[in-house]
Image (cartoon, rainbow, N blue to C red):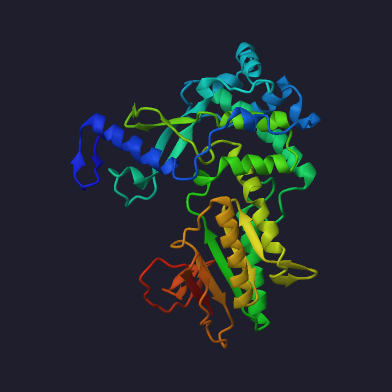
Amino acid sequence: MEVTMEDNSICTDSKIVLDKWKCDFSNMLNSGNLYEATEKDVNSCIITDGILDSEITNDEVLNILKLSKAGKSPGCDEIPMEMYKNQTAISALTQVKAVTTLEARMIPELWSRGIITPIPKSSTSDPRDPMSYRGITLAPTSYKLYCGVLNSRLTVKLDELNFIHDEQNGFRSNRSTIDHLSTITSIIETRKMCKMSTFAAFIDFKKAYDTVNRFLLFCKLESIGISSKMLNALKSLYHKVQSCVKVNGKITQWFDVQCGLKQGCVLSPILFNTFINNLVSEVKSLNFGIPIEEEKICILLYADDIVLLVENESDLQMLLDVLHMWCHKNDISVNLSKSKIIHFRPPSFPRSIYTFMLDLVSTVIKREIVILQKSFNIYSEDLPSPVLVEEEYQ
């Protein structure tokens, strides 16, 4: 067991190695604005809802059991999903139901703990560098069942409210990235044949799930009418969250995780969709975008992956300004090095020389890339700092 230290030396002492893994992941998972639920937060509103507040039933738990995949690694409870799938283990099912009451404002302490399993980001990354891995958190199986029930109820409620914008396809039933890719490709090719340019900004957020401001999230949930009982249940899931990292069969000491959403939790996608939903509202309020019949398409999302679409440079700059303001208000950062602006144009059209700005950083035309199986002709220009890249397609 080895780890690369800050001075690039290699350490083999198991205690130091584990401590290094703990410190690196703790710093990464606590890089956003910290939030810890208080009693005042929990009692901030009194809203009731028949769907969200009713007692959890055996049928609900059994339905989540049927949808749950077997063969997954268990969390710190060391109980595999197969045990709960065994219909003869009715005592275990009863136990799950007993501790998943919405009346309780605190969850079992075990549910607050997750074991992080590091997965290499690429085959060429340094295996001794903890930051060359992304963490997959293993949660207790009973916790997964409980969150599955909450997720099912919350999904029904948000669908009833028609809350999540149609532009969001991330983790929604009968929707996929293919739908958005087909839409984008159709728009680009149709406008190209009609001798029209299309400007697209592909936006990547920096550690989107890990940096979600929990206080803002709970405020947004409350503002749309999520019941007090459901809100308290969600807040309790984020009370004293702790994680450890499992390295070569050994685990680090436990550390607190005080910001962001839980990676691997079934609730995280719908919570993130709720958090980012008002960005769509703000972008659409400008009434820019690509005209499609009686509507305009200006933004498409798959969870935290975003593309902005407009007809000209000035409109795109205004959308970027809205994005910048939203990020500032919601404590989210754009990963400038991974975000791109692309000018899709007919061959006879000159390439754009417009300088876009985002977060006081200008864009430039860069190298050649291939996206959507199309070739993009890129021209290089050096800048002293990281930039949001503008590219063009002919």
Q: How many numbered badges does the structure rendering display? A: 0
Q: Quadrant of the C terminus?
A: bottom right
Q: For this rendering, which residue is in front, 129 or 82? A: 129
The quarter holding residue 63 reads top right
Q: For this rendering, which residue is in front, 100 or 386? A: 386
User: Is 367 placed above or below 273 here?
Assistant: below
The quarter holding residue 251 reads top left
Q: Quadrant of the N terminus?
A: top left
Residue at horizontal 55 percent and vertical 56 percent from the top: 328
The residue furthest front is 40
Residue 145 in view, yes or no: yes
Residue 89 drawn at (x, y percent): 61, 13
Residue 141 drawn at (x, y percent): 55, 25
User: Is 253 placed above or below 354 here?
Assistant: above
The residue furthest top is 91
User: Is 368 placed above or below 230 here?
Assistant: below
Instruction: Judge from the rendering whether residue 39 lies leftward or rightward of residue 51; answer left or right.
Output: left
Instruction: Judge from the rendering whether residue 124 lies leftward or rightward of residue 111; answer left or right.
Output: left
Residue 67 in view, yes or no: no
Residue 250 drawn at (x, y percent): 33, 27
Instruction: Judge from the rendering whether residue 7 lies leftward or rightward of residue 353; answer left or right.
Output: left
Residue at horizontal 68 percent and vertical 29 percent from the top: 43
Residue 55 drawn at (x, y percent): 74, 22
Q: For this rendering, which residue is in front, 66 or 158? A: 158
User: Is 220 placed above or below 332 here?
Assistant: above
Residue at horizontal 27 percent and vertical 43 percent from the top: 128
